[in-house]
Amino acid sequence: MDMKTLLYNITFNCTEMFSSCTFKSLQKDCCEMFIPTFTEYGICFVFNSQHHLKSILDIEYPEVEIQNIQETDPDWAVRFVVRNTDTPIWIYITSSDELASTDTQPHHVWDFNVEEVMFSVKETYTTTDTAQLSIKQRRCAFDEDIKLAGYTDYSYTLCTRQCRMNNVLRLCKCIPYFYPSYKRPCDIMDLICVSEKLDEISNLDHCNCYLGCLNTVYEVEKLDALGTGREDTWRSTLTIKFVSWPMVKYKREVLFGWVDLLVSFGGIAGLFLGFSLLSGVEIVYYFTIRAFFMVLMEKDELRRIKKEESMKPIPPYDLSLTPYCISKPLPGYGIDQVLKNYKQSEKMGKQMVLGRRRLKPPSDVMIPPFGIEFMN
């Protein structure tokens, strides 16, 4: 007999625990409404939860359809009557994807002196544009950011359960019965190892667990004590409901992202420099893609343009310092053009000889006007 079956046999079942159950003013079968599940505290009876036993021994539990309660009318509450009032009952109020764990304290310890527990809801949701940020930056995790063994959804308590489960597997080479069994389950001797190394197993310093990006917090706001003169039946009856509606919602979003920064810089550049992102793209295009395809596909046209430019007459250069408002520009040639013509004639063998001496380079015989120096 495994540990799960043994524990299930020695604890109360639903018929021994509950005598009647009501939800939304409708009488319900307690064994269909409250389904047992294994937690770090042992067996708990959960209502409207994704985490419950599918089957144990010869008992098959039906699939649970998650109910969304959006009303505060007292008739739409959860009410149940228990058979045994000797031992206080721990009441946890969580989301449908959460489980009671050693990280959380019970919202109320029912000692049968209270007949109504009223709670409030505060929900924090995160917009999808925060996915561009890292988990550390947004301080929360989506379901797809961190995958947990045995769970499809992500939450902080499930992540810490996963961390403790990994610690047990690392230290004792097994997994306790109250965790999803994808490795060797722990036997009695292994549980001794778990007990001896409990402090190290409970250490969450290296777990890297974050709150879920969709996180709901439930807080008990009001307790209605049992009135005097009530019958014993009311002493064993508890009603759990919302205290008020609507609930408080908080939103986590990116107020200023990279796109906003780019738009801001683009607006400043456009205002002061007349520059835009499109202008920058055009500059890159003209000096890269356009230049490449021009050289590759229009070689003949480039040769023709180069030949036409070389056949054009040499433009005159005015080396005078007289302002144009006093006299018109005088024709002339710059020293660079003169040297160019000299080198071309020397290369072609057209050397001019004056007497028995070769003609000196123009730079040696030309004297610039007063106050002007030829610069190459």
Image (cartoon, rainbow, N blue to C red):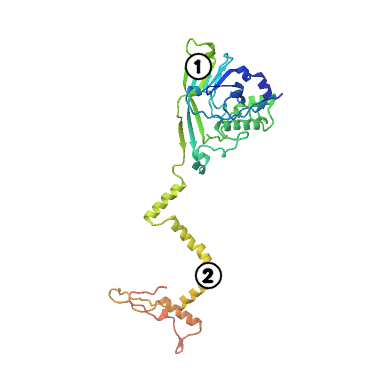
| Relative to 245, residue 298 above or below | below
Would residue 281 be visible to someone looking at this image? yes
Look at the numbered discs 2 and 1 and tell me whether their residues touch, using CB distance below 8 Å: no
Q: Which mark is residue 114?
A: 1
Distance of label 2 from label 1 (alpha carbons): 92 Å
Q: Image quarter for residue 41?
A: top right
Position of the N terminus by quadrant = top right
Q: Which mark is residue 179?
A: none
Q: Image quarter for residue 179?
A: top right
> Which of disc 1 and disc 2 is earlier in sequence?
1
Q: Position of residue 132 (x, y in %)?
A: 51, 44
Q: Position of residue 28 (x, y in %)?
A: 58, 22
Q: Determine whether the residue tagged by mark 1 lies in a helix, strand or loop.
A: strand
Q: Return the residue found at the far left.
A: 326
Q: Position of residue 56 (x, y in %)?
A: 67, 25
| Relative to 34, residue 129 above or below | below
Amino acid type for the residue under numbered disc 1:
Val
Would residue 42 be visible to someone looking at this image? no
Label 2, on which residue? 298
Position of the C terminus by quadrant = bottom left
Residue found at x 48% / y 63%: 286
Horizontally, residue 29 falls left or right of residue 1, namely left
Horizontally, residue 250 falls left or right of residue 192, namely left
